[in-house]
């Protein structure tokens, strides 16, 4: 008898915290700093709340830097036809998005271009912006 109201009370108290736990796109990524990078896919973290895609990107001098791209949640990507098996380790991908505000080698992943030229939306719809890197 006492347990039910207690559980309900805790659920009501914790629900606002869950609502604020998810941040706005612009809180983490700078829409004034578009990036478009090509590299070898080395790792995919396929989990909620967002998958992460990691590319080894080579610069003009041959130095390799690992970049992480935050993409949509797994369920949203699957509805768009992108599955774990769509992202093959060792494949060369080009990903455009916006650089992380903290200056790290992280970025939003908005659009991925596969080696065969196919494009796919991997970011949140509101993340697309006319300032996307060309």
Image: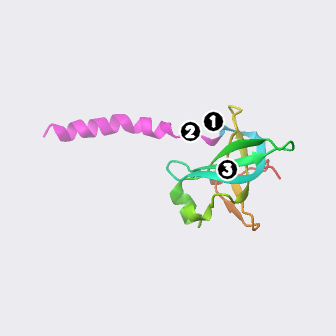
Which residue is tagged 3? 109
**Quadrant of residue 102 in the image?**
top right
Q: CA distance from mark 3 to mark 1?
A: 15 Å
The reply to whether discs 2 and 1 touch (Cβ–Cβ < 8 Å) is yes
Which residue is tagged 1? 27
- Dot 1 falls on a residue whose secondary structure is helix
Which residue is tagged 2? 23
Query: Residue at left 55%, top 49%?
Result: 50
Q: Is residue 56 above or below residue 28?
A: below
Q: Is residue 5 magenta?
A: yes
Residue 69's mark?
A: none
Work out whether residue 2 or residue 95 is closer to the camera in this orientation and state it: 95
Which residue appears farthest toward the right when viewing the image? 60
- Dot 3 falls on a residue whose secondary structure is loop
The reply to whether discs 3 and 2 touch (Cβ–Cβ < 8 Å) is no
Which stretch appears magenta?
A: 1-25
Is residue 83 visible from the viewing direction of this image? no
Query: Residue at left 68%, top 62%?
Result: 120
Q: In terms of secondary structure, what is the magenta stretch mainly?
A: helix
Image location (x, y in percent) of residue 79:
55, 65
- The first of marks 3 and 1 along the sequence is 1
């Amino acid at each position: 008898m006492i347990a039910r109201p207690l559980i309900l009370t805790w659920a009501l108290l914790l629900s606002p915290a869950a609502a604020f736990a998810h941040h706005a796109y612009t809180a983490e990524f700078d829409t004034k700093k578009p990036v478009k990078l090509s590299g070898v896919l080395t790792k995919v973290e396929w989990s909620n709340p967002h998958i992460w895609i990691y590319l080894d990107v080579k610069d003009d001098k041959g130095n390799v830097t690992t970049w992480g791209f935050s993409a949509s949640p797994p369920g949203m990507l699957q509805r768009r036809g992108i599955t774990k098996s769509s992202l093959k380790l060792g494949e060369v991908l080009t990903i455009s998005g916006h650089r992380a505000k903290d200056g790290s080698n992280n970025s939003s992943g908005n659009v991925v271009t596969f080696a065969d030229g196919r494009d796919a939306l991997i970011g949140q719809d509101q993340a697309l912006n006319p300032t996307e890197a060309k």
